[in-house]
Image (cartoon, rainbow, N blue to C red):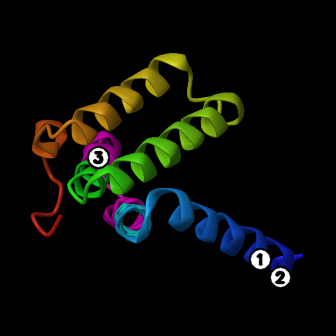
Amino acid sequence: MKVAIFFACLMCLVAVIEVRGWEYAKDFAGGARDMWRAYQDMRQANTIGADKYFHARGNYDAASRGTGGRHAAAIISNARELFQGGSSGRGAADSRADQEANRWGRNGGDPNQYRPRGLNPRY
């Protein structure tokens, strides 16, 4: 199963490179890494109220790479909210607030607008 998923991802990457170009694919992959890093930092920080900051920061970092990174941020953010909105029990209002922070960061807004008190300055 893992091999099939790997080859499916590889074929998607080849298609993206063919259609959009290598620079777009590189930015997309970098944007996906930025989103992953923000998620890992959020888990490690374990600070109440910090999730919106990490949503905004991940989207900001990814979008700053260019069109590919911006698209990666949008796809990952939307998929995450779609998945969590239906299964986590967090509620529609929290999902809307997450999406607002996602868009804020993706559109170049300073993620520190969402920084809560007590968040380690390392982040």
Q: Which residue is mark 1?
A: 7
Furthest residue to the top? Answer: 93
Viewer-nearest of labels 3 and 1? 1
Residue 46 falls within the magenta-colored stretch: yes
x%, y% of residue 16?
55, 61
Depth check: give the residue in front, 117 or 22: 22
Tell me which amino acid carries mark 3: Ala
Residue 120 colored in magenta in the image: no
Q: Which residues are magenta?
A: 35-56
Q: Position of residue 75 (x, y in %)?
A: 51, 44
Predominant secondary structure, magenta span: helix
Q: Is residue 39 above or below residue 95?
A: below
- Mark 3 to mark 1 CA distance (whole Å): 36 Å
Do callouts 1 and 2 mark residues in contact (Cβ within 8 Å)? Answer: yes
Helix, strand or loop at label 3? It is loop
Q: For residue 50, which numbered disc appears in the image? A: 3
Q: Is residue 62 above or below residue 110?
A: below
Task: Residue at 33%, 66% (x, y): give it.
Answer: 41
Q: Disc 2 or 3, which lies upstream in sequence?
A: 2
Mark earlier in primary sequence (3, 1):
1
- The kind of secondary structure element at disc 2 is helix
Q: Nearer the viewer, mark 2 or mark 3?
A: 2
**Which amino acid does the dot numbered 1 rest on?**
Phe
Q: Secondary structure at mark 1?
A: helix
Residue 112, horizontal then vertical, whole percent? 11, 44
Q: Residue at x 59, y 41 (%)?
A: 79
